[in-house]
Amino acid sequence: MAQHRLLFVCLGNICRSPIAQGVFGDVAARAGMADRFFLDSAGTGTWHIGNPPDPRAAAAAARRGIDISGQRARQVRAHDFSDFDLLLAMDRTNQSDLCALAPEPHTAGIRLFLADAPELGVAEVPDPYFGGNDGFEEVLDLVEAGSRALLARLA
Ligand code: 4NP
């Protein structure tokens, strides 16, 4: 069966999208479907290229048994719009930035990551970078729910 190629996208690629890559990978692995997916993450911004995840993001993921420390930030590139099947934006700004960056024609879909979990009543994963630790716990909660919903749709 063909692999789903998923790219998780936020602004800096050091908080939300590395968490989403790690959590979705964990959820898929627990469901015995790790080999059905190729996963990566990227940012629309340039500030943190080459950097590991924010220590607060890595700690919040580690508290839930997920190691994201090996990831390194990179920027979204034109090839991503054909190398991946689906680009999953953490918020509406990320989504509109992706639409502006997308070469024409392109084959990847561009969706809000939480679009499959309307029961959450939240469309966006809020940017935790300038806030406190509570923000990272909220990101983990939303990303876990969003990952289960996304897996249920794709599986
Ligand atoms: P992320 O969070 O988009 O979830 O990785 C941010 C990280 C860094 C910045 C903004 C958001 N920044 O402005 O440097």
Image (cartoon, rainbow, N blue to C red):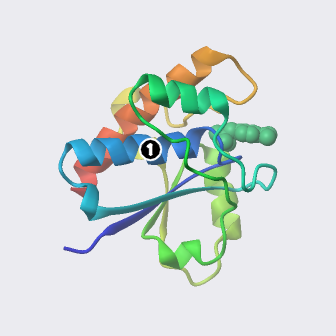
Q: Position of residue 155 (x, y in %)?
A: 21, 56
Picture layout, residue 4 above or below residue 126 = below
Q: Position of residue 42 (x, y in %)?
A: 61, 57
Which of 2/49 is in front? 49
Where ligand 1 lies, by quadrant?
Answer: top right
Q: Which residue is mark 1?
A: 22
Residue at 66% across / 45% down in the picture? Answer: 52
Which residue is at the far right?
Answer: 47
Quick one: label 1, few (<14), some, or many (20+) residues within 10 Å?
many
Q: Is residue 90 at all visible to an observer of this figure?
A: no
Which of 79/120 is in front? 79
* Quadrant housing residue 1: bottom left
* Quadrant housing residue 39: bottom left
Residue at 69% across / 58% down in the picture? Answer: 97
How many numbered marks, from 0 up?
1
Q: Position of residue 117 (x, y in %)?
A: 36, 38
